[in-house]
Image: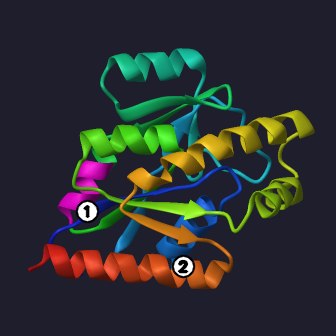
């Protein structure tokens, strides 16, 4: 394991595959820890509080924000999201690669607060493919999907600000590319 941990931010439009890819990294690599974000959005049927997100009321979120609990916060798709700062510092201090899957707004905040973080943007092969993925998830109504697709066009423009960009045509290949980035960054930081 690396003697110096680091923070890796993986971003993409909704449906781009960032959450699935981050889970794959955590499951397959003992040197990777997942940073669980907080949100005010309702929990989906397949999610668990504390594993997928920390689900909070608006009041809880405001209270924690006032107390400096978050490294960043963002308002996305009509809900609030935030990243607890303490687990990032703890895990990177132990030499772990802390991986975060964030929307572009949250990623930009983390880049400001942690300028040495490794940033990766996952691009969909096309907007048509992204729409298919969002429809196939069956987690959002048609209007929410339209909002997510409109937002995706703006988010993709922001991808130029990320250190790495990967087109996610094949999940396993994209996973291998992400894993290779981690290995290269570890080598670079241990020199």
Residue 142 location, quadrant: top right
Q: Nearer the viewer, residue 85 or 150?
A: 150
Horizontal and vertical percent position of residue 152: 66, 46
Q: Secondary structure at mark 1?
A: strand
Q: Residues within 10 Å of mark 2 (few under 14, many from 20)?
A: some
User: From this viewpoint, is residue 84 visible?
Assistant: no
Q: Compared with residue 164, is residue 110 higher up or lower down, i.e. above or below?
A: above
89 inside magenta stretch: yes
For the C terminus, which image quadrant?
bottom left
Question: What span is colored magenta in the figure?
Answer: 88-94
Q: Is residue 71 magenta?
A: no
Query: Which of the two labelled residues, at mark 2 and mark 1, occupies the earlier sequence position?
Result: 1
Whether residue 33 appears in this view of the structure is: yes
Q: Left of 121 or right of it: where is 127?
A: right
> What quarter of the picture does the N terminus occupy?
bottom left
Task: Label the magenta part by its dominant secondary structure.
Answer: helix
Q: Is residue 37 left or right of residue 161?
A: right
Residue appearing at x 59%, y 85% in the figure: 173
Q: Crowding at label 1, few (<14), some or many (≥20) Cα neighbours within 10 Å?
A: many
- Name which quarter of the figure residue 77 lies in: top right
- What colour scheme was applied to this rendering of the protein? rainbow
Q: Which mark is residue 104?
A: none
**Which residue sits at x=89%, y=39%?**
141
Where residue 116 appears, as percent x and y from the top left, is 22, 55
Q: Which mark is residue 6?
A: 1
Q: Extreme right residue here? A: 142
Spot occupied by residue 44 in the image (x, y as percentages of width and height): 76, 44
Element on which disc 2 rests:
helix
Q: Which residue is mark 2?
A: 175
Tell me how far mark 2 sits from mark 1, CA to CA.
Answer: 18 Å
Q: Position of residue 169 (x, y in %)?
A: 68, 76
């Amino acid at each position: 394991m690396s003697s110096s941990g680091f923070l890796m931010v993986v971003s993409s439009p909704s449906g781009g595959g960032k959450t699935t890819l981050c889970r794959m990294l955590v499951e397959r690599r003992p040197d990777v820890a997942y940073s669980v974000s907080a949100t005010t959005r309702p929990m989906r049927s397949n999610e668990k509080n504390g594993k997928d997100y920390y689900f909070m009321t608006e009041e809880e979120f405001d209270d924690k924000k006032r107390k400096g609990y978050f490294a960043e916060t963002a308002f996305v798709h009509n809900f609030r999201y935030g990243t607890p700062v303490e687990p990032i510092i703890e895990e990177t201090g132990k030499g772990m690669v802390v991986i975060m899957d964030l929307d572009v707004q949250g990623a930009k905040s983390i880049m400001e607060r942690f300028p040495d973080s490794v940033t990766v943007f996952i691009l969909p092969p096309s907007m048509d493919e992204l729409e298919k993925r969002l429809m196939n998830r069956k987690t959002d109504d048609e209007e929410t999907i339209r909002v997510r697709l409109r937002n995706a066009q703006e988010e993709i423009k922001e991808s130029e600000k990320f250190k790495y960009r990967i087109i996610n045509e094949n999940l396993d290949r994209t996973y291998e590319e992400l894993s290779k980035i981690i290995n290269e960054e570890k080598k670079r930081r241990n020199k």
